[in-house]
Image (cartoon, grey):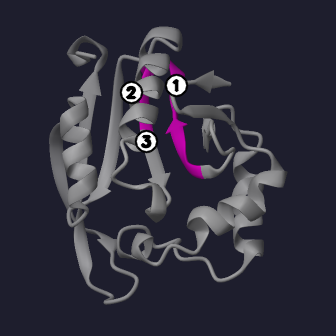
């Protein structure tokens, strides 16, 4: 477990399924950017949590004051020898624009660069997700590429480009 000023960041347990579903699983706006959302049944979240509960690099974000689950962060490290990871995150709609994503990502970027000794972290986002673009830019990520038609808006069916950006350990300035 890791803590920030306002967050407890811990690994998933199956018992998180219902609170994750209630917190962000049903968020309609996430469907604009991530095809998995919104979920219609808690069993979908149970399946997701089952796949994450044994992953030491999958983290639930829990608000300290209330104990509410507000989102999650994952770090995929496919080849440990390369020391490169891909960070992904979701913040429940009702907790967005409150600085939680910045706080959590800052903490986890430091953890993976200084404790896990990664060289580079990569992030991907839907080009229409302006909030993620601004957040990653604020954190120091630099755009690497725009991949055509790699994302889809679940509601409109329109394909969007996926932006790939990254930051190296040497570029961190927080």
Residue 165 on image: x %, y %: 23, 41
Task: Give the residue furthest to the front.
Answer: 65
Q: Which of the 4 quarters of the picture holds residue 169?
A: top left
Secondary-structure class at tag 3: helix
Mark 3 → mark 2, Cα distance in angstroms: 10 Å
**Tag 2 near tag 1, CB within 8 Å:** yes
Residue, disc 3: 100
Query: Residue drawn at (36%, 17%), measured in percent from left and top?
Result: 119
Task: Give the residue furthest to the right.
Answer: 15
Answer yes or no: is residue 141 visible.
no
Horizontal arrangement in the rendering, residue 90 relative to residue 46 (left or right)? left
Q: Magenta region: which residues? A: 70-86
Residue 128 on image: x %, y %: 21, 67
Secondary-structure class at tag 1: loop
Residue, disc 1: 4
Horizontal arrangement in the rendering, residue 94 relative to residue 102 (left or right)? right
Residues packed near mark 3 inside 10 Å, few (<14), some (14 to 19) or many (20 plus): some
């Amino acid at each position: 477990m890791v803590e920030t000023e306002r967050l407890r960041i811990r690994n998933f347990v199956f018992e998180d399924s219902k609170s994750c579903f209630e917190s962000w699983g049903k968020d309609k706006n996430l469907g604009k950017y991530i095809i998995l959302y919104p979920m219609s049944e808690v069993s979908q979240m149970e399946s997701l949590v089952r796949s994450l509960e044994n992953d030491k690099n999958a983290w639930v974000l829990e608000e300290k004051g209330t104990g509410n689950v507000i989102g999650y962060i994952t770090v995929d490290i496919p080849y440990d020898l390369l020391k490169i990871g891909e960070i992904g995150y979701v913040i429940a709609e009702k907790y967005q624009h409150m600085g939680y994503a910045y706080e959590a990502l800052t903490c986890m970027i430091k953890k993976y660069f200084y404790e896990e000794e990664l060289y580079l972290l990569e992030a991907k986002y839907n080009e229409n997700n302006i909030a993620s673009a601004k957040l990653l830019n604020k954190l120091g990520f630099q755009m690497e590429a725009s991949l055509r038609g790699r994302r889809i808006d679940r509601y409109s069916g329109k394909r969007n480009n996926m932006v790939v950006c990254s930051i190296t350990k040497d570029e961190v300035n927080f």
